[in-house]
Image (cartoon, rainbow, N blue to C red):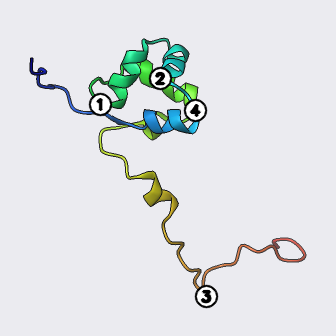
Amino acid sequence: MPRPERTEPVLYNRLAVLRAERSLSRQDLAEALGVNYQTIGYLERGEYNPSLELALRAAEYFALPVEAIFSRRPFAPMSSQLYTAPTPARADAPSHASRPGGDS
């Protein structure tokens, strides 16, 4: 039997990544958020959008802003954010090194 077509927009999320970083099972996260473990699977696969209340509970649980967990646009891969080439310092840029005698 084919699945019904989705009528609401997809809400992207980082739940699976956050669970993996913290070595949490779907059951662990479900219990912490007060939902069924299957709900976590539906959320991670984008088959279900959380209520505002559930999204806020997840943000509170992970101690992150809601926008760090859920987005209307796909997230950039974490590797592209972590492993970008550092920008070389310019010679004319102010130095952040402390000066003897204070900042006066």
Q: Secondary structure at mark 4?
A: loop
Horizontally, residue 35 falls left or right of residue 4, namely right
Which numbered disc, 4 or 3, marks the residue that appears first in the sequence? 4
Q: Position of residue 68 (x, y in %)?
A: 46, 40
Horizontally, residue 69 falls left or right of residue 101, namely left
Q: Which residue is mark 4?
A: 23
At x 21%, y 32%, the residue is 9
At x 61%, y 88%, the residue is 91
Q: Position of residue 40 (x, y in %)?
A: 40, 22
At x 31%, y 45%, the residue is 74
Q: CA distance from mark 3 to mark 1?
A: 47 Å
Going by the numbered disc 3, the residue's amino acid type is: Ala
The residue lying toward the viewer, choosing from 48 and 28, is 28
Q: CA distance from mark 1 to mark 2?
A: 15 Å
Q: Which residue is mark 1?
A: 46
Going by the numbered disc 2, the residue's amino acid type is: Arg
Q: Position of residue 35 (x, y in %)?
A: 44, 12
Q: Which residue is mark 2?
A: 26
Q: Of the numbered discs in the image, which one, if any, rests on residue 91?
A: 3
The residue lying toward the viewer, choosing from 61 and 18, is 18
Q: CA distance from mark 4 to mark 1?
A: 21 Å
Q: Of the numbered discs in the image, which one, if any, rests on residue 83?
A: none
In the rendered view, would you say 58 is above or below 98? above
Q: CA distance from mark 4 to mark 3?
A: 44 Å
Instruction: Tell me the quarter of the picture where residue 6 sits.
Output: top left
Find the residue positioned furthest to the front: 1
Q: Position of residue 31 (x, y in %)?
A: 53, 14
* Disc 2 residue crowd, few under 14, some 14–19, many 20+, Cα 10 Å: many
Horizontally, residue 56 falls left or right of residue 49, namely right
Instruction: Tell me the quarter of the picture where residue 11 sits.
Output: top left
Going by the numbered disc 4, the residue's amino acid type is: Ser
